[in-house]
Amino acid sequence: MNNDILVIEDNGEMQDLLRLLLEQEGYHIISAATAGEGIAILRTRPEVILILLDLTLPDMKSDEFLSAVKTERILENTPIMFFSAVPRLKQMKLPQGVVGVIQKPFKIPDFIKTIGEFRTAPTTMRQNLFTKKSHEKRVG
């Protein structure tokens, strides 16, 4: 089973922390410091099971990232979780393809539980998220 998670986060220390936490849980982490770098990685490794996307990246906004990957049809069914310290992140209406949010700062056990719950969700449930126009599933 593929365990690749793409972490798009411009803070190197946060990338290192996420790598440490998630690799201990059996995931393989691919890191990108910008949305553009993340898109380039997805072009060559579209098999990632989840994208953790920081909302405050230096090169593009989250909606621009979502539009770019949709336009290029890079990730037809690859779920995305927003990951940010943006205030009121959990109250946001989530765009199609975004399965949840993780609010920074986070408690490590809650973070691991959120990722684990997503991973154990039936594949059909995860794929069904992409057939709706919008949804408001909250995690974290």
Image (cartoon, rainbow, N blue to C red):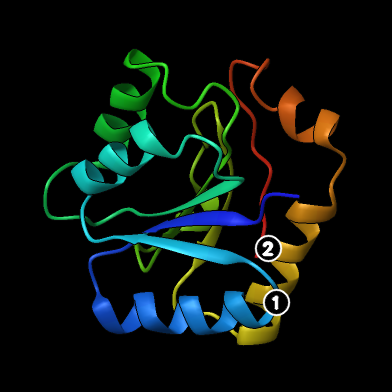
For mark 1, does the 10 Å Cα neighbourhood hold few (<14), some (14 to 19), or many (20 or more) residues? Answer: few
Q: Nearer the viewer, residue 139 or 91?
A: 139
- Do tag 1 and tag 2 residues touch (Cβ < 8 Å)? yes
Rendered position, 5 above or below 128: below
Residue 60 appears in view:
yes
For mark 2, does the 10 Å Cα neighbourhood hold few (<14), some (14 to 19), or many (20 or more) residues? Answer: some
Between disc 1 and disc 2, the foreground one is 1
Rendered position, 41 above or below 124: below
**Position of 122 compared to 77: left or right?**
right
Residue 27's x, y, as percent? 63, 66
Q: Nearer the viewer, residue 21 or 93?
A: 21
Q: Earlier in the sequence, mark 1 or mark 2?
A: 1
**Residue type (three-letter) at the residue carrying disc 2:** Ile
**Residue type (three-letter) at the residue carrying disc 1:** Glu
Residue 2's x, y, as percent? 68, 49
Which residue reaches farthest left? 59
**Position of 10 compared to 130: left or right?**
left
Identify the element where label 2 is drawn.
helix
Q: Nearer the viewer, residue 80 or 49?
A: 49
Q: Quadrant of the C terminus?
A: bottom right
Residue at image location 56% in from the left, 38% down from the top: 47
Q: Which residue was labeled with disc 1?
A: 25
- The image quarter containing residue 107 is bottom right
Residue at image location 53% in from the left, 80% down from the top: 106
Cα distance between the residues tagged 1 and 2:
10 Å
- The image quarter containing residue 85 is bottom left
Residue 119's x, y, as percent? 76, 54
**Position of 112 compared to 21: left or right?**
right
Q: Which residue was labeled with disc 2?
A: 115
Residue 88 appears in view:
no
Residue at image location 79% in from the left, 59% down from the top: 117
